[in-house]
Amino acid sequence: MLVFVTVGSTRFDALVQAAISEPVLSTLRNSGYGRLVLQRGNSVIEPEEFNEESTIQRHGVDIEIWRFKPSIYAECEQADLVISHAGSGTILDVLRLGKPLIVVPNPTLLDNHQEELASALQILGHLKATSIQDLASTIASFEPRDLVPFPPFDGTKFSKLVDEEMGFI
Amino acid sequence: MSNCATILLSFLSFFCVRLFFVIFSSRRIRLAPANPRPSQTCSIAIFLGSGGHTTEALKLASALDFSRYSPRTYIVSEGDAFSAQKALALEHVKATDHVFSDDQPQHKLLTIPRARRVYQSLLSTPPDAVKSLLACMYLVSVRPLFKKGAFRQPFVDLLILNGPGTCVILCAAVLLNRLIGLPSPRMMYVESFARVKSLSLSGKLLYHFTDRFVVQWPDLVQPGGREVYRGCLV
């Protein structure tokens, strides 16, 4: 199975570092994930050679690393699990694709409303929110079947609002 | 000297009363429907504030009936190629869905200077904000006056805003336009889906000044508040 880790256009060193750490990789392998695609955006990884676009094997997981692609749609589509930063755009895209999602809000952000969005969506059962420290244990106990499907995009709500405002309704 | 002061004072108080009227008339007394006949079209402008703001704004735009809401003006900040591209992509997708009746261009892109760049020092912000305000005033107040065959028509019928910074300047330009009594667009602000428990800075600033203020999470609805909540819109 394939897991896709994404940080969007941000820099989130802690998440990419955690994704290739021994505890997370071992947990992934034990949960049946043999492949990891890691989109690191502007994040910097140690050791140095991981910063090249590369394919590496580590702790029994095949890891593919790159920075950006015009669209991450294909990767999300193929993935059996997505682990992401808590950016609202990425969250919406992944949930609308119906993919199991674990989000890790970036604690270093100044005005951390990402945390609020992540926990609000967790309360509704659409995703699992966790922290860098708890990432491995969250993956181990994660049950995609328990998630509540996110409602598809419904344009009529906004178009009705605008029609009301402009006197069409 | 005292005459001067009296005149100045009366001008000032006139503008204060006018400002109060402009702000509160649009919220308390509902304006007459801008467009009562369903057959008519309604021009809109959508501010694309870059990144996630643009993605949400275009998602909102995609929900609209493009044959009714036409022509569409996308306002982007200087140097924001991402937003311009995404707007054109949406128009392209919509054009393949609909067959528009005439050859008139249905959409256009306008660029305004940024009020404040990320990481810009606070000292250099005011001159840029002024430059941005002047550009917005030209767009909202001056340009419509010289438009052929459309005297006393607002710049657009509806302006949709969803942050960040520069959209506040755009709103200020519309308010100034109302202050001097020129025809003005209605303004709708849609707070980002990312704001669950507190409004963004742009949201807080524009809360009292837009005709419709829309939020996407129930916790943002205050008892007796003016915000509208209809669930997730994007």
Image (cartoon, coloured by chain):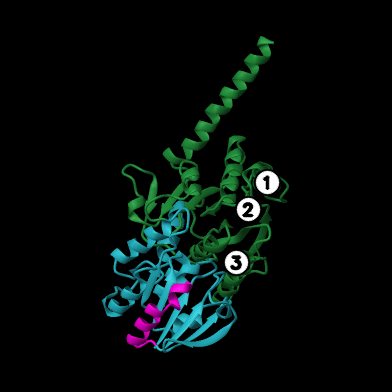
Tell me the tag on residue B87: 3
Residue A107's spot in the image, x, y percent? 43, 60
Crowd band around label 3 with a 10 angstrom C-alpha radius: few (<14), some (14–19), many (20+): many
Tell me if label 1 and label 2 are in contact, CB under 8 Å: yes
First-in-chain label (1 vs 3): 3
Residue ranking furthest to the left: A146
Between circles 3 and 2, the one closer to the viewer is 2
Q: Is residue A28 magenta?
A: yes
The front one of A63 and B32 is A63
User: Share a chain, discs 1 and 3?
Assistant: yes
What residue is shown at x 42% (from left), y 69% (from top)? A91
First-in-chain label (1 vs 2): 2
Dominant secondary structure, magenta: helix
- Label 1 and label 3: CA atoms lie apart by 25 Å
The front one of B14 and B42 is B14
In the rendered structure, the colour chosen for chain A is cyan
What range of the chain is rendered magenta? Answer: A16-33
The residue under label 2 is B117
Q: Which element carries disc 1, helix, strand or loop?
A: helix
**Image quadrant for the N terminus of chain B?**
top right
The residue under label 1 is B128
The front one of B1 and B100 is B1
Chain letter corresponding to the colour green: B
Crowd band around label 1 with a 10 angstrom C-alpha radius: few (<14), some (14–19), many (20+): some
Q: Label 2 lies in what chain?
A: B
Between circles 1 and 3, the one closer to the viewer is 1
Q: Amino acid type of disc 1?
A: Asp
Q: Label 1 lies in what chain?
A: B
Residue B191's spot in the image, x, y percent? 45, 54
**Image quadrant for the C terminus of chain B?**
bottom left
